[in-house]
Amino acid sequence: MTPRDSRDSTRHHNDAEGRRREPVPLCSRPLPRRAGLSFFSRRTVRGPALSGGAPQEPIRSRQRRSRRLFLRTLVLFAVASLTGPASAPAIEPTEALRLFLDCDRGCDVTFLRSQITYVNWVRDRRDAEVHVLVTTQSGGNSREYTFNFIGLERFESIDQRLIHTSSFTETDDERRRGVQRLLELGLVRYVLETPQADGLVVAFENGGKQGEPHRGHFHPEPNALVAGADDDPWNHWVYRIRMETDFRSEDRRNSQSYQASASAGRTTDLWRMGMGTYYSYRESNFEFEDGGTFKNVSRSTNYFGQVIRTLAPHWGLGVGASSRRSTYLNLDNSYRVAAAIEYNIFPYSESSEREFTFAYFLGGTRLDYEEVTVFDKRNETFADQGAFVAFGMERPWGEAHLDLQYSHFIDDFDRGRIEFSTDIEYHILRGLSFDVYAGVSRIRDQIYLPKGGATDAEVLVSRRQLETDLTFRGGIQLRYTFGSIYNNVVNSRLSSESGGFSRIF
């Protein structure tokens, strides 16, 4: 994974209206007040129960009982953890290779476990003999997987790196079988040192399609060389067209959306070029109890183009232009041109594993508004500049990402924004991992806000960007898994993603 990929939503938060799901209001109108109970009241409710004459249990009493039940459950889990094995069970030297696969994106782990059955899949890297760390980065028409095989215990210091390239035109099955093939090739070095080596067979099939099954294994085409521009009739250009629609309906509300996009891109060692367009239409209709209705419509259109030139292993230079219309941002028409230069402390060839970049940009923007803004403007033009700092790495202990961005108008330093975000995942010890993310933005450049503000209904359905000086988001996650170290068995019976037969509603 390119560390930058996990932060796209942070860098382009103003595009949220083009990608977010349709919000579901908590209620379509204020709830009626009932006798003795306000909607947000914390008072204890006393009186007859809904059925029968027994008094209703006080709310606070139920809350305390729920907390006690939750605490008892935690204690039971803690006791189970402490009374379990104090350390990992002794491993016989004659068992199969113990493998830990560390792949967050692009790997169908369930499929791999069902196909590669001659190793012991373990849940934690501290129980493994081989830790496979997989990182990905996307090119013009392909995704590159980097497999880092890290030897542990008896394979200490026996490491290797393999690279697999998957085309975006491949099906999901072709992609996962390509990942399987390279993973198995990398495991050969280690399996040779186990009793499973007696079952290894080397096969070479001359001809046939890449990824075609042969005796339960998959083999690449022999003599396949990397194609150059002269060998490619498309000259490395890749074109994409996408159309999508979504309909949802209930008795008192319904929604529909239409999205379409088209893009073209070309990626080589020296150049990265892209252009495209995107259109979105979203409509929601609500009916209230008194018969009133409310309709929300949001439109967005984008055009973009950019050219990036490789200057050196650590340098890149780019120019770009874009046009945008957005109900959410009060933009009727907007146009922008900009140029940027970036330096990476590490070579860009290592960007799937680590990067530390510094960038500067300078641009000009013309805005035409749907409604008069808070500054009594119907249109305006301005120039701005800014700088970005981004750091990211993926290691066996976890991963870390950090972004710092600053920009301001050339003629008014007070109009600008500062944004900071970070995401850190750390594997503390066997089965225990810690994940924290946070982001804060100081915003002073919302010149596009309409003078009339947003109605209550527009606020509820997120139709307009709201005025704000500061935004903050964050979260902490602690995960602890204990018990059997093995993860070999695949059993998908009654595994409905929607919850299946045990789901409440």
Image: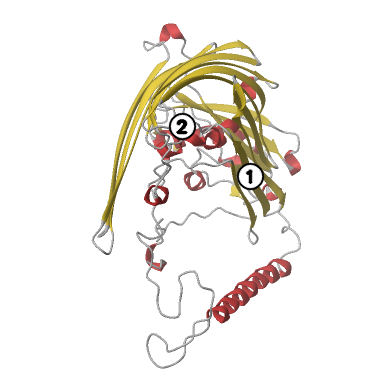
The picture places residue 113, in percent across and down from the top left corner, at 51, 47
Q: CA distance from mark 1 to mark 2?
A: 27 Å
Disc 1 or 2, which lies upstream in sequence? 1
Whole-percent x and y of residue 122?
62, 51
Q: Amino acid at mark 1?
A: Ala
Q: Which residue is mark 1?
A: 438
Q: Is residue 97 visible?
A: no
Residue 291, quarter of the rendered image: bottom left
Q: Is residue 34 above or below residue 352?
A: below
Image quarter hosting the N terminus = top right
Q: Which one is in front, 4 or 443?
A: 443
Q: Secondary structure at mark 2?
A: loop
> In this figure, which residue is indicated by the disc labeled 2?
448
> At x 66% / y 41%, what residue is drawn?
131
Left/right placement of residue 429 relative to residue 61 reads right
Which one is closest to the eye, mark 1 or mark 2? 2
Quadrant in the rendering for residue 343: top right
Q: Is residue 380 left or right of residue 243?
A: right
Q: Nearer the viewer, residue 27 or 112?
A: 27
Q: Residue 346 appears at what percent x and percent y?
A: 69, 22
Residue shown at 72% from the left, 59% from the top: 89
Residue 459 pos. (x, y %): 42, 48
| Residue at position x 45%, y 40% in the image | 465
Three-letter code, disc 2: Tyr
Q: Nearer the viewer, residue 20 or 74?
A: 20
Foreground pick, 147 / 341: 341
Residue 211 visible in rendering: yes
